[in-house]
Amino acid sequence: EPEVTQTPSHQVTQMGQEVILRCVPISNHLYFYWYRQILGQKVEFLVSFYNNEISEKSEIFDDQFSVERPDGSNFTLKIRSTKLEDSAMYFCASSEEVKGEQYFGPGTRLTVT
Amino acid sequence: AQSVSQHNHHVILSEAASLELGCNYSYGGTVNLFWYVQYPGQHLQLLLKYFSGDPLVKGIKGFEAEFIKSKFSFNLRKPSVQWSDTAEYFCAVNGNTDKLIFGTGTRLQVFP
């Protein structure tokens, strides 16, 4: 069964450094998403992406965040200058249709020290 | 603003007991509703979904959920839980856009 994959599984970085989290969505999916879950809190929406454009972003997704689909398979989330409060589990998801079932990847645990 | 409430944060059951996990949402328009499960060390997986039609939906592993529009609820049920159902369960909705709004999750522990 096709799966969403994410790399790395765990990233440790120092405050102020840039990180790139990578995702490979399911190949025939057109809608892509990033969510995050801070330890002990709920899963929160960050951004949705369709047709090489951001469809919607949350208040969390400020100028420090960006997304890109650099080729036909990868979907990346970049944090330009990480803060301690960016420490969380980041989940990528993809969907075949708008408002359809979203398939989630295993997540990247980001630890900012 | 849309929101989802899951009232049970931690549920402990013995095998064969019945399960009902509550989920309420706030949104006045048409919604799609989802229950996701996260087994220990694994990623979020879809248990079941409601888009339209029969408000009683059946999902994988014997789970079902009932959409009650008048109560803004989408409770998850299973008549007889197993030890392997130990996991965290998340209710989620999308309303006017495709972003998912999640509840805080319910941790279910099932003891043999």
Image: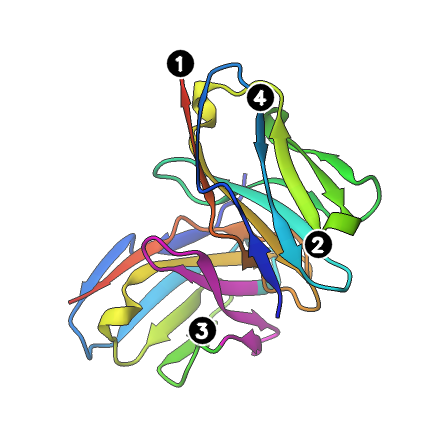
The nearer-to-camera label among 1 and 2 is: 1
Q: Chain of mark 4?
A: B
- Identify the disc placed on residue B18: 4
Residue to which mark 2 is pinned: B32
Q: Residue at the location (35% across, 74% down)?
A: A78
- What secondary structure is the stretch in magenta mostly built from? strand
Q: Which amino acid type corresponds to the residue marked 1 in the rendered image?
A: Pro
Magenta span includes B96: no
Q: Residue at the location (50% across, 75% down)?
A: A58
Q: Which amino acid type corresponds to the residue marked 2 in the rendered image?
A: Asn
Q: Which quadrant of the view contains residue A18? A: bottom left
Q: Which amino acid type corresponds to the residue marked 4 in the rendered image?
A: Ser
**On the same chain: label 1 and label 4?**
yes
The reply to whether callout 3 and callout 2 are in contact (CB within 8 Å) is: no
Q: Residues within 10 Å of mark 1 (few under 14, many from 20)?
A: few
- Identify the disc placed on residue B112: 1
Q: Chain of mark 3?
A: A
Q: Residue at the location (52% across, 64% down)?
A: A33
Instruction: Kindly report the distance in space between the C-alpha atoms of the residues bearing marks 1 and 4.
Output: 14 Å
Q: Chain of mark 1?
A: B
Residue to which mark 3 is pinned: A70
Instruction: Kindly report the distance in space between the C-alpha atoms of the residues bearing marks 1 and 3.
Output: 49 Å
Q: Nearer the viewer, residue A100 or A29?
A: A100
The secondary element bearing badge 3 is classed as: loop
Q: Magenta part of the protein: which range?
A: A32-58
**On the same chain: label 3 and label 4?**
no
